[in-house]
């Protein structure tokens, strides 16, 4: 209970900090939302007219007052209106958020699948050449720019082969290429971490013991190594999902999908404070929730972390285990 | 493990195949449609590079907004895109204008209705123009740039309306034909500025040949034909309902995706085909339309009140030192005509001033030497403690502005002038634009098919590209300002043309500007699209468009 309260308190603090920093950074950029919308040469407004409009938006009040106004607005659930287009921020987010979550979720899923395949083939594949090739895949994937992958996939699968339509595609078809585009670069760090993790676990004595007892490589992999190697990968996956929620802006631009990344990029370009603050709040909350989930999943995967006493005993991991705690052996032999 | 090996092999071979196929490029559309008779039916898919941000007609200057407003609203007068003449549309004839152009009276057709059934009558027209001419600061509507000196409107009877102005407004007739004066219903006019934005598209009611039927914020807009439309401009060949059943406006921001979607036949037409991509439309079944914008040319404005550019010799040297033809040859295509004056050759009031814009690098060096600008140790010239270092803005709405400025930078370095580009997004550029001393040279363009366009660009109280007018209300070159004002206040066409010619002559003689090219709006489309036109500033008009099957 205390644990949950503590985490909640930390979450609120993080949210407040993110909100404030985002607001200040946007205010520090040259120009403001009203200028961005009404100050373009096309509209040809005089400075007096601009000042009038600025006053109508309440932009002539001091910075602190405006900041507090925005903050109170958020607390009461009033997200305000975009300065650039006048659309209700809640509307914009309602369109962007589900699309982003879907893309991020599927992207991560496919990335995990790819990462697991690569990592397992790199460590247990038959043939040294195969293992070596797969070991080099993560650095290769991470060096491919996301927009390049997206454009190549579109050119090949949509324009040349005509397999996937871009316009008027049904929801499933419309997801195939963007998901692949997202999955490839993020599969790389996942695979890398997993590979290192597997390498470490394989060195453990319990693995030798299990093999000596006649376990096949498959048994070894799925029932012993995988579980223990997953922890760092899980943390990484959580972080990557959080990044995807806010940052898939390039993929969204290439495929013309609405999303939080696009919304953020446009909000900064247009100095659109209400939209930016809404996006910051949403992504911060997402990150916090994901972190909490990952932390709660740890004990599920690793028995040593389940009870505080054994967790502390497991920390100084050494081959010489204390005779009183039998938990390590239990976890290893599952 | 064979399962994993097979999976691994599959992954590797797919990756290799993709890499190989990536080398193949080239469009696969081979649409062999022939002309034939116009046929009704079909939905056109139209790709835009940016999403629209408001459907308020007064802000339809932004191309994505204008592309929609042009097809869902009608205007009082119709401007022929080729001759630039004004013709009747919702008004039954050209307006009656008094001697000093301060009073305009329009007689309207009586059979026009909005798509929600309400009639388009004099009261509605008066309400439309009251908002455009006077604005409404509370609802955040700015006064329209094109409607100047508006005083009031008067509803004489159900089909007659009179507009009055506090000073001569000879450009008003053309202003009523522009997209910025699209007529919308009374209910629509009661909306606030926010309520014209994304999320409200289906509630914006116009009387045009198409009606908005659906919207997905930020990605798509669907238009449906209006079956009972019967008030097209009388001078058009096609009358009655539009041929197309509907139009889908889809946002495709990435250039290669937009171009490829059309060349592979998944969409029929796209706007903004950049010069490097034009070659892809050279194959069979694909076409390009480079629509002229009939206004002030894409070019540089030298801010002559700044110390570095205040001398006439310096400006003349800058002009002589920039090779415009090389810029066009390197960065653009034959659709971008070399400018021969401040205005496009097809614009109203155009005069040829090309002799002032000749490239001659030796002459540039001579001019600077004679004026006493001596090269310092880093090769950049100096005089009286002022370094010849100029900051240019980046004109984000203009094509390839950054590349153009970079090329100019190389060329001017050879004569000892340093060029810097102001980095930053649109908001940063807009913030720097009106501040004296931030920019010495301003890259821009403006499209409007009226004599007033040159005033819009250079007058100290309008766009003020030369920064002739400072924030403290002082004016550097009063003569230029007076000449520009004369364009907007001469009541006759001849008077306006003369004033425009005089203004262009002054701009050329004083070396205030260097025009690069006549900026087109380039559309790429497939064979099946027939009868596609643009209006006078290059925005798409789909009324007479039909799809050949």
Image (spheres, grey):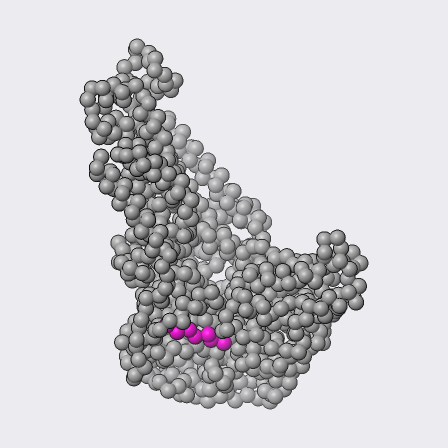
In the rendered image, the quadrant that contains the C terminus of chain B is bottom left
In the picture shown, does residue B60 fall above or below A125?
below
- Residue B110 in sight from this viewpoint: no
In the rendered image, residue B287 lying in the magenta stretch gets the answer: yes
**Left or right for B447, reference B469:** left
Main secondary structure type of the part rendered in magenta:
strand
Q: Residue A224, image x and y in percent?
A: 25, 26
In the rendered image, the quadrant that contains the N terminus of chain B is top left
Q: Residue shown at 44%/65% (left/top)? A: B277
Classify residue B37 by image quadrant: bottom left
Q: Residue shown at 35%/45% (left/top)? A: A184
Q: Residue shown at 75%/53% (left/top)? A: B377
In the rendered image, residue A328 lying in the magenta stretch gets the answer: no
**Left or right for B73, reference A59:** left
Q: Nearer the viewer, residue A43 or A332?
A: A332
Q: Residue B26, image x and y in percent?
A: 36, 64
Task: State which region is magenta.
Answer: B286-292
Q: Nearer the viewer, residue B330 or B420?
A: B330
- Residue B341 in sight from this viewpoint: yes
In the picture shown, does residue B375 fall above or below B181?
above
């Amino acid at each position: 209970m205390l644990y949950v309260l503590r985490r909640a308190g930390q979450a609120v603090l993080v949210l407040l900090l993110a909100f404030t920093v985002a607001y200040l950074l946007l205010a520090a950029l040259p120009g403001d939302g009203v200028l961005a919308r009404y100050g373009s040469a096309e509209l040809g407004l005089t400075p007096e007219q601009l000042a009038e409009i600025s006053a109508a938006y309440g932009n002539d009040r001091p910075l602190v007052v405006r900041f507090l106004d925005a903050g109170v607005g958020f607390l009461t659930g009033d997200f305000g209106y975009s300065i650039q287009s006048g659309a209700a921020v809640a509307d914009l987010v309602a369109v962007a958020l589900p699309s982003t979550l879907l893309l991020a979720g599927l992207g991560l899923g496919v990335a995990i699948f790819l990462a697991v395949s690569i990592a397992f083939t790199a460590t247990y594949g038959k043939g040294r050449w195969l293992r070596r090739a797969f070991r080099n895949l993560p650095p290769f994937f991470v060096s491919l720019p996301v927009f390049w992958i997206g454009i190549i996939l579109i050119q090949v699968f949509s324009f040349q082969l005509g397999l996937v339509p871009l316009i008027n595609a049904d929801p499933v078809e419309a997801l195939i290429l963007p998901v692949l585009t997202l999955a490839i670069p993020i599969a790389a760090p996942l695979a890398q971490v997993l590979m290192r993790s597997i390498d470490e676990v394989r060195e453990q004595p319990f693995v030798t013991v299990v093999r000596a007892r006649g376990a096949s490589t498959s048994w070894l992999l799925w029932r012993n190594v995988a579980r223990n190697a997953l922890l760092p990968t899980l943390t990484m996956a959580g972080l990557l999902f959080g990044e995807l929620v806010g940052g898939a802006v390039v993929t969204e631009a290439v495929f013309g999908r609405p999303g939080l990344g696009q919304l953020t990029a446009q909000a900064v370009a247009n100095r659109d404070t209400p939209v930016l603050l809404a996006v910051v709040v949403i992504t911060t909350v997402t990150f916090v929730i994901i972190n909490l989930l990952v932390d709660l999943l740890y004990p599920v995967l690793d028995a040593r972390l389940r009870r505080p006493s054994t967790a502390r005993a497991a920390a100084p991991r050494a081959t010489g285990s204390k005779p009183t705690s039998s938990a390590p052996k239990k976890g290893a032999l599952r | 493990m064979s399962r994993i090996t097979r999976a691994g092999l599959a992954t590797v071979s797919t990756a290799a195949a993709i890499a190989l196929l990536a080398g193949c490029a080239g469009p696969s559309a081979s649409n062999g449609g022939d002309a034939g008779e116009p046929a009704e039916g079909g939905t056109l898919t139209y790709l835009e590079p940016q999403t629209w941000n408001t459907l308020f007609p007064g802000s339809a200057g932004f191309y994505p907004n204008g592309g929609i407003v042009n097809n869902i609203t009608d205007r009082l007068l119709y401007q022929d895109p080729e001759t630039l003449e004004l013709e009747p549309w919702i008004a039954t004839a050209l307006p009656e204008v008094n001697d000093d152009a301060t009073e305009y009276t329009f007689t309207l057709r009586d059979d026009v209705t909005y798509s929600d059934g309400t009639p388009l009558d004099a009261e509605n027209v008066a309400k439309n123009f009251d908002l455009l001419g006077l604005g409404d600061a509370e609802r955040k509507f700015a006064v329209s740039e094109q409607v100047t000196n508006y005083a009031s409107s008067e509803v004489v009877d159900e089909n007659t309306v009179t507009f009055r102005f506090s000073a001569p407004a000879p450009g008003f007739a053309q202003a009523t034909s522009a997209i910025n004066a699209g007529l919308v219903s009374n209910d629509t006019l009661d909306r606030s500025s926010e309520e014209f934005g994304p999320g409200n598209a289906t509630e914006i009611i116009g009387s045009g040949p198409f009606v908005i039927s659906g919207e997905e914020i930020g990605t798509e807009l669907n238009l449906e034909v209006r079956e009972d439309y019967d008030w097209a401009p009388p001078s058009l060949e096609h009358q009655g309902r539009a041929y197309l059943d509907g139009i889908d406006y889809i946002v495709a921001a990435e250039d290669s995706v937009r171009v490829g979607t059309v060349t592979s036949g998944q969409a029929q037409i796209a706007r903004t085909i950049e010069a490097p991509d034009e070659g892809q439309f050279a194959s069979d079944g694909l076409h390009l339309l480079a629509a002229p914008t009939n206004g002030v040319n894409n070019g540089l404005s030298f801010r002559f009140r700044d110390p570095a550019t205040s001398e006439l010799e310096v400006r003349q040297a800058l002009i002589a030192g920039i090779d415009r033809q090389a810029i066009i040859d390197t960065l653009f295509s034959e659709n971008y005509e070399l400018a021969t004056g401040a205005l496009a050759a097809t614009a109203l009031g155009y005069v040829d001033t090309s002799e002032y814009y000749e490239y001659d690098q030796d002459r540039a060096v001579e001019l600077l030497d004679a004026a006493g600008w001596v090269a310092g140790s880093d090769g950049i010239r100096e005089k009286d403690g002022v370094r010849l270092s100029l900051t240019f803005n980046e004109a984000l709405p203009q094509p390839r502005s950054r590349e153009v400025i970079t090329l100019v930078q190389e060329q001017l370095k050879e004569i000892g002038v340093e060029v810097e580009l102001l980095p930053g997004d649109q908001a940063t550029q807009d913030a720097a634009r009106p501040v004296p001393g931030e920019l010495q040279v301003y890259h821009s363009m403006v499209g409007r098919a009226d004599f007033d366009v040159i005033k819009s660009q250079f007058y100290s109280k309008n766009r003020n590209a030369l920064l002739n007018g400072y924030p403290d209300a002082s004016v550097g070159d009063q003569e230029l300002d007076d000449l520009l004002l004369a364009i907007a206040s001469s009541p006759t066409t001849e008077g306006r043309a003369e004033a425009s010619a005089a203004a262009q002559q002054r701009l050329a003689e004083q070396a205030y500007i260097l025009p690069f090219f006549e900026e087109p709006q380039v559309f790429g489309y497939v064979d099946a699209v027939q009868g596609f036109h643009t209006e006078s500033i290059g925005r798409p008009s789909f009324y007479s468009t039909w799809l050949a099957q």
